[in-house]
Amino acid sequence: MTKTYVSIPEDRLKILKKKKEWIKKIEEYGNVRIRLNEYVEIESEDPLNVIRVQNVIKALGRGFGLKEALYLLDDEYRLEIINVKFFAGKSKARERELKGRVIGTKGKMKRIIENFTGTKLAIYGKTVSIIGRWKDVEIAKQAIEMILKGAQHQTVYRFLERHRI
């Protein structure tokens, strides 16, 4: 029996505790047993199932919905978490500004990255997270890091055009 624990933000854990149908679905699809305390406990006979479901729980903790998070049960998909704080330093204002740049006006930049790369993005807390196929996640990650390092949106659009799926 393999067991692991995942810590996710308290507000996201509360959502999981309320949405028992999500837990049932994850247990069924992932072939695991889940217990919710002040953390998420995942248990299964198959260690690979534990790792896959651990990523699903991390994705839920980073702001994704159940539908997007369940993609991570498929080996073709992965989760990438980028810490905005790394690019912003100690400034909370800079952190907010950078997350705003990734989102763009009325969510335009976020939508463009998702559409060009076939990925899903979640901006939550101090992170920008990506779910998608391995190669697509790499392209989206590069685009997001370009924005976080200060590249103009037009430069990122051109980059995405060159790497369009």
Image (cartoon, rainbow, N blue to C red):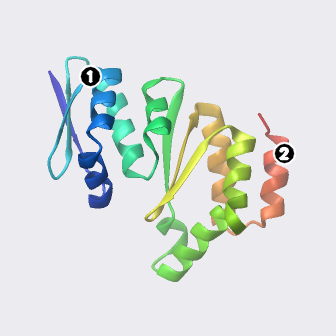
Q: For residue 144, which quarter of the picture?
A: bottom right
Quadrant where the image shows the C terminus: top right
Quadrant holding the N terminus: top left
Residue 161's tag is: 2
* Front residue of 1 and 15: 15
Residue type at mark 1 is: Pro
User: Residue at 57% across / 49% down in the picture?
Assistant: 121
**Disc 1 to disc 2, C-alpha distance:** 39 Å
Reply above or below: 44 against 105.
above
Q: Position of residue 111 (x, y in %)?
A: 69, 52
Q: Closest to the observer: 86 or 106?
A: 106
Query: In the current view of this chain or complex, which residue is farthest to the top?
Result: 45
- Judge from the rendering whether residue 145 lies leftward or rightward of residue 15; answer left or right: right
Location of residue 94 by image quarter: bottom right
Residue tagged 1: 47
Residue pictured at 39% horizontal, 46% vertical:
60
